[in-house]
Image: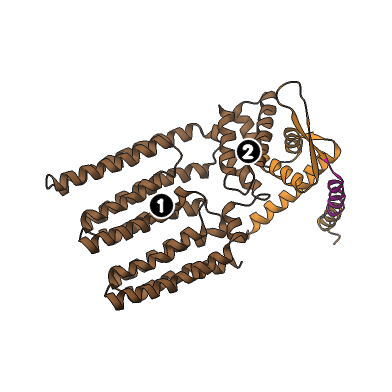
Amino acid sequence: MHSKGGGLVNSQFKKGIIEMCVIAVIARQDLYGFAVIETIAKDIDVNENTIYPILRRLTVQGYFDTYMEATGIGAPRKYYRITEIGKAKMTEYAAEWSKFLRGVLKILGGNA
Amino acid sequence: MMKRNYLDEIRKLLGDYEISAAEINDIIADYDRMYEDGLAKGMNDAEVIAFLGNPEKIVRELGDTYPRKVDVRFRHGRHGRDNKIIALTPFIATITYFILGMAFGLWHPGWLVFLLIPVTAIVVNGRQSFISTLTALSPFIAVVTFFLLGATVGAWHPAWLIFLIIPMIGSLNKPLKWQNIAFSASLLIAVGGYLYAGYALGEWGYGALAFLLPLFVGAAFGLEVTIRDWRHMDTKGWSRAEKWFRVGMILIIGGAIAGYLALGFYANLWGVAWLLFFAIPVYAIIGKAGRKSRLVALSPFIATTIFYLLGWFGGWWAYSWLAFLMIPIIAILQGNR
């Protein structure tokens, strides 16, 4: 039976994972908004409408800074670049996530 | 055109949030750029919108970063002072009521002072625009005018017509301006026709047929708007819930007018049928208000309905005003969360 709050917890959990993925892809290389969504949506089944708001929130929180780059055609693109705070957050996420995954795999493997 | 609609919808929805104009412009510029990137990748407009997400959901997600204006006011702004004002109104109303009753014998319509409580709650808790506040207040403006005209000059009929300001003002909340104006105009024409038939020709019964005009106009525009919205849903990026909300509002307004006239003409329940018009602001609050402020915003309507139904059908006016105490109680309890 599903609990009433199950959907909310599930949604928050997914948001946490997407947040981590957004930081990870930008930590790898500077990207513009559309490319961030495209990169993540290519590998994970997510609601694309959540990615930009997360990207914006993380920028407001100081995990990224932005710069404009001309494209030759149309308006310049806004690129997102990870900051030192963002890098620290990424390290923290990576450690937490590895620990979490190890625990889950251990349980699934029946070694708990 | 499609991109413009899409960006306009995002901009409009962002207006409900605590975001500076510069930040809104920045968000719109980001979506503008991403939209162009999508088109450059060979996507068509519908695909780009599906890729970026519908405006309603995007803006709701942005709510993690930027709270809604209503919730901000409720949570931080002035809720302590607001609650004091709301909490004081039952005492002010009760004292005024007893003074009017005992000193001047004005128990009726002196009970109208209790409407000060829901009116204060509506004004103080704050809506986002003048027209929204006016919509919420319109049932109270109408009932006070109705009872004052009835009690002072005995003009119960046709004073009941004042209740038609509620759907008129309610219709002005919707986006398509000229249809709203046409609907309001049709109501005014119907009122004019009805009064002319009644006073000049002595045909109040046939005169009531004039009200078929706004019903037809409302139904025709409602249908047209619904079909149009359905056809252009991709360009506006509306969710199914948003579309049904708009359809529901049309039905609620039409239903309230039809129900009011039916209960009035066929059951002679003019005195109580006006409560049906509460359905308009109540529906808007349920559909649009933030979770935190919803119950507080609904409480004036719930209290007034309980107060009036107990008084009207049970004759318990002396006790039913206690229902208004729920407004400050709910405001304080919700505000402390």
Dominant SS type (magenta): helix
Colour given to chain B in the rendered image = brown
Residue B119 visible in image: yes
The verdict on residue B313 being magenta is: no
Q: Quadrant of the C terminus of chain B?
A: bottom right
Q: Is residue B324 above or below residue B119?
A: below
Q: Position of residue B200 (x, y in %)?
A: 13, 45
Q: Residues within 10 Å of mark 2 (few under 14, many from 20)?
A: many
Give the extent of the magenta segment.
A82-97
Label 1 marks a residue whose chain is: B
* Image quarter of residue B104: bottom left
* Tag 2 near tag 1, CB within 8 Å: no
Question: Residue at coordinates 30% horizontally, 75% vertically from top-left?
Answer: B101
Tell me the number on the disc at residue B53. Answer: 2
Chain in orange (letter) = A
Q: Which residue is mark 1?
A: B280
User: Is residue B151 left or right of B200 when viewed as pictured?
Assistant: right
Q: Residue at x 38, y 72 (%)?
A: B321
Which label belongs to residue B79? none
Q: Is residue B60 above or below residue B83?
A: above
Magenta run includes residue A90: yes
**Disc 2 residue type (three-letter):** Gly
How many other residues sit within 10 Å of disc 1, few (<14), some (14-19) or many (≥20)? many
Instruction: Give the mark, 2 or 1, whose residue is nearer the N terminus.
Output: 2
